[in-house]
Amino acid sequence: MTYFIALFFAISSVFSFVVGSPVPATNYPLAKRASAPGRGTWFDVGLGACGKTNVNSDAIVAIPASVYSGGSHCDQTVSIKNNANGKSTTATVRDECPSCGSNDLDMSPSVFSSLGDLNAGVLDITWDFN
């Protein structure tokens, strides 16, 4: 009987050790956030929601209020692509755009003009955080 009790505890110990062992880490690459088409507009910049004053020649954008998250993206860069002509550029988040849809950006004139003509007023864009 003592033999069976000892065997039971031995098997229980091994089972507990195996079940309680950590799972080895896997190195799956993180997928980049897929960007959906949105509208790109431009505005005359100044003091932005991130608390910094900019001028129209600065490469800055205002991101949608739904993405702004209380300023957590301030000073982060974004890559922007004009879907009509394939031109791309980067800019820094310095403001919030309350009237933008969730995939829209409001850009400084210098950013907008690097992607298209200011007279167009609106561009079909995609964008992602860098």
Image: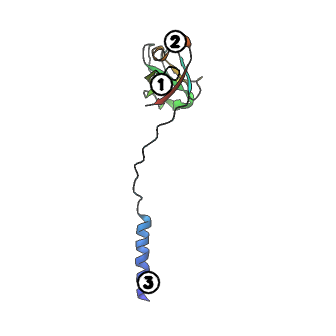
Please name the residue that numbered disc 3 is placed on.
5
From the image, state whether disc 1 or disc 3 is nearer to you: 1
In the depicted structure, whether residue 25 falls above or below residue 95:
below
Reading the image, the residue beneath label 2 is 118
Pointers 1 and 3 in contact (C-beta within 8 Å): no
Category of crowding for the residue at label 1, using alpha-carbon neighbours closer than 10 angstroms: few (below 14), some (14–19), many (at least 20):
many
Kind of residue at disc 3? Ile
Local packing at callout 3 (Cα closer than 10 Å; few below 14, some 14-19, many 20+) is few
> Residue 14's image quarter?
bottom left
- The percent position of residue 48, horizontal first and vertical second, equals 49, 20
Residue 83 in the image, given as x and y percentages of width and height: 52, 23
**At label 2, which amino acid type do we have?**
Leu
Chain-order first, disc 1 or disc 3: 3
Residue 106 lies, in percent from the top left, at 53, 20
Q: Is residue 4 above or below residue 40?
A: below
Question: Visible in this render: residue 50?
Answer: no
Residue on which disc 1 sits: 80
Mark 3 element type: helix
Label located before the other in sequence (2 or 1)? 1
Q: Residue furthest front?
A: 85
Q: Which residue is rendered at x = 42% and y = 78% of the image?
A: 9
Residue found at the very far top of the displayed protein: 119
Q: Residue at x 46, y 40 (%)?
A: 31
Frontmost residue, 21 versus 47:
21
Looking at the image, is 10 positioned above or below residue 130?
A: below
Mark 2–mark 1 distance (CA, rounded to whole Å): 16 Å
The front one of 49 and 39 is 39
Q: Observer-nearest residue: 25 or 46?
A: 25
Q: Amino acid at mark 1?
A: Ile
Q: CA distance from mark 1 to mark 3?
A: 69 Å
